[in-house]
């Protein structure tokens, strides 16, 4: 049973890692567009937009990589929870100030506007990160399964939203010309590579250690 919980933790870590990795790569691949989106958040000082456009995707990618390594995963879950909590706060403020503000969650790959669904999605991923951290400390079944379900639901909402955005972009010939369609062949390859890397990096040894030593998990690797 504990071994199964450990494998479920791996699945949750990989899902969160893939989400953050794709979001970071999408932002950093078009820094001009990312800065434009940041400047549309009226409550943020315009002077910090150049700093955020670089630091945010770097942080996302760093956390995504850290989630895949056994020795850093427990700490990365806290960083992930903090980041998603910030997203919830920023998106909520922006939503009530201007309901037409673009999300920019996945850079130019998505033309999504901030909605209650966007905020709820970030909340789900925050909850998944918190529960995943708790499961690393003490792998209780309800915490482990809860984190997995929250992350899975968050992934489904993201895919659903971005698929809709992709159909919308297909109508917009200017966007198509720029090649900003989500789930292109290159994006699909990135997702597959990220998932394979996550599964490979989470070795059988780390799973056994997590199952047997609970909060002392870090010392046994």
Image (tube, rainbow, N blue to C red):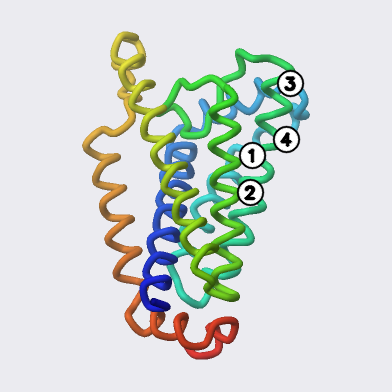
Q: Tell which circle, 1 or 4, labels the residue nearer the N-terminal end.
A: 4
Q: Tell which circle, 3 or 1, labels the residue nearer the N-terminal end.
A: 3
Q: Nearer the viewer, mark 3 or mark 4?
A: 3
| Residue 112, image x, y percentages | 48, 22
At label 3, counting other C-alpha atoms closer than 10 Å, the crowd grade (few under 14, some 14-19, many 20 or more) is few
At label 1, counting other C-alpha atoms closer than 10 Å, the crowd grade (few under 14, some 14-19, many 20 or more) is some
Which residue in the protein does label 4 denote?
A: 48
Identify the residue at the far bottom of this view. Answer: 220
CA distance for labels 2 and 1: 6 Å
At label 2, counting other C-alpha atoms closer than 10 Å, the crowd grade (few under 14, some 14-19, many 20 or more) is many
Q: Tell which circle, 2 or 3, labels the residue nearer the N-terminal end.
A: 3
Vertical arrangement, residue 212 with respect to residue 94, above or below: below
As rendered, which of 17 and 136 lies closer to the eye? Answer: 136
Q: In terms of secondary structure, where does tag 2 sit?
A: helix
CA distance for labels 4 and 2: 17 Å
| Residue 38, image x, y percentages | 63, 28
Residue 83 badge: 2
Which residue in the protein does label 1 denote?
A: 87
Which residue in the protein does label 3 denote?
A: 42
Q: Nearer the viewer, mark 2 or mark 3?
A: 2
Q: Pointers 2 and 1 in contact (CB under 8 A)?
A: yes
Q: Tell which circle, 4 or 2, labels the residue nearer the N-terminal end.
A: 4
Q: In terms of secondary structure, where does tag 1 sit?
A: helix
| Residue 127, image x, y percentages | 59, 50
CA distance for labels 1 and 4: 16 Å
Residue drawn at point x = 48 percent, y = 40 percent? 28
CA distance for labels 3 and 1: 15 Å
Identify the residue at the far left of this view. Answer: 185
Q: Pointers 3 and 4 in contact (CB under 8 A)?
A: no
Vertical arrangement, residue 169 with respect to residue 26, above or below: above
């Amino acid at each position: 049973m504990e071994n199964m919980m450990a494998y479920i933790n791996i699945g949750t870590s990989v899902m969160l890692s893939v989400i953050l990795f794709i979001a970071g790569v999408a932002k950093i691949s078009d820094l001009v567009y990312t800065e434009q989106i940041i400047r549309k958040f009226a409550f943020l000082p315009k002077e910090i937009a150049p700093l955020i456009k670089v630091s945010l995707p770097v942080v996302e990618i760093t956390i995504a990589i850290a989630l895949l390594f056994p020795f850093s995963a427990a700490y990365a879950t806290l960083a992930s929870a903090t980041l998603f909590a910030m997203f919830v706060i920023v998106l909520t403020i922006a939503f009530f100030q201007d309901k037409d503000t673009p999300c920019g969650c996945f850079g130019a790959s998505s033309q999504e506007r901030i909605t209650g669904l966007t905020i709820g999605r970030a909340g789900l991923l925050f909850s998944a990160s918190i529960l995943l951290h708790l499961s690393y400390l003490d792998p209780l079944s309800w915490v482990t399964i809860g984190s997995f379900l929250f992350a899975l639901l968050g992934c489904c909402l993201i895919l659903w939203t971005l698929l809709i955005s992709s159909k919308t972009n297909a109508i917009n010939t200017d966007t198509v010309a720029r090649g900003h369609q989500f789930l292109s062949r290159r994006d699909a390859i990135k997702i597959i590579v990220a998932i394979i890397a996550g599964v490979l990096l989470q070795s059988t040894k780390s799973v056994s250690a997590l199952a047997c030593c609970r909060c002392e998990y870090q010392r046994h690797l």
